[in-house]
Image: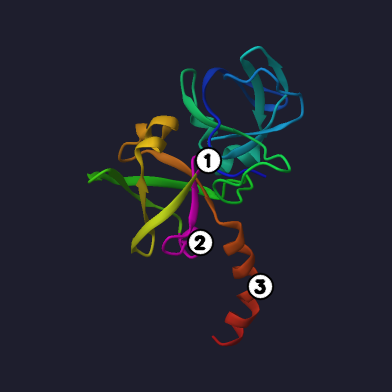
């Protein structure tokens, strides 16, 4: 479980295809990682395999590679990092599972006052779960849906702090990003499905 509040920005040092999957070695500021702990890379929950001072490795299996951008990462790529939530930690963002639902695409960026507005196209099944001013995780960052300009587009408003402390300040039109819908919305949709089907 995560909150979408980024701990650090890591840098992919190298990648390799191994028996465990697509292995990534990431440089980060962490000095107290443990083998087997969960860590989210751009919102994708992965397991620490090996670690040392300021570095760790994880491996992404086929399922993860199919629904994320991890296979596209190369040495030098910057990734948002968040360690798993501990009991008693502040829940500063929202409940994030680290299970990327799909990939969205940035279609427009503009500055309005002190905010940077990002229009992002998302798959229809994720769009159905979004509500105005609700939560959405983008590349591991807990964000608020600022507007819903069309059925498959979410507008996000990024503050200066987010731009400085995450990789979202690097976004450009055409960039693919990890998207995780609000888990509460998923459960509500699942519970309501039989009733919605009955009235159709």
Q: Residue at x 44, y 31 (%)?
A: 165
Label 1: state its secondary structure: loop
Mark number for residue 125? 2
Q: CA distance from mark 3 to mark 2?
A: 16 Å
In-image side of 10 versus 144 (left or right): right
Q: Earlier in the sequence, mark 3 or mark 2?
A: 2
Compared to residue 124, the image places residue 162 above or below, namely above
Mark number for residue 140? 1
- Nearest the viewer among 181 and 143 is 143
- Kindly indicate the quadrant of the structure image that contains residue 159: top left
Q: Residue at x 42, y 40 (%)?
A: 176
Query: Magenta region: which residues?
Result: 124-141
Furthest residue in direction top, as rendered:
53
Q: Residue at x 76, y 24 (%)?
A: 35
Marks 3, 2: nearer the viewer: 3
What percent of the width, then of the height, locates residue 161? 39, 36
């Amino acid at each position: 479980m995560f909150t979408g509040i980024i701990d650090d920005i890591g840098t992919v040092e190298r990648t390799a295809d191994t028996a465990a999957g697509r292995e990534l070695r990431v440089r980060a500021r962490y000095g107290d990682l443990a083998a087997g702990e969960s860590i989210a890379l751009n919102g994708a929950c992965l397991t620490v395999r090996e670690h040392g001072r300021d570095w760790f490795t994880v491996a992404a299996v086929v399922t993860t590679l199919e629904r994320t951008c991890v296979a596209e990462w190369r040495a030098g790529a910057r990734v948002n990092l968040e360690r798993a939530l501990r009991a008693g930690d502040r829940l500063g963002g929202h409940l994030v599972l680290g299970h990327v639902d799909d990939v969205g695409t940035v279609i427009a960026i503009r500055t309005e006052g002190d905010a940077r507005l990002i229009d992002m196209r998302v798959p229809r099944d994720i769009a159905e779960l979004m509500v105005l001013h609700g939560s959405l995780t983008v590349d591991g960052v807990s964000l608020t849906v600022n507007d819903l300009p069309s059925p498959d587009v979410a507008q996000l408003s990024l503050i200066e702090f987010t731009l400085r402390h995450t990789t979202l300040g690097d976004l450009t039109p055409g960039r693919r990003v990890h998207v995780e819908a609000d888990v509460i919305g998923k459960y509500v949709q699942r519970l309501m499905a039989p009733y919605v089907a009955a009235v159709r």
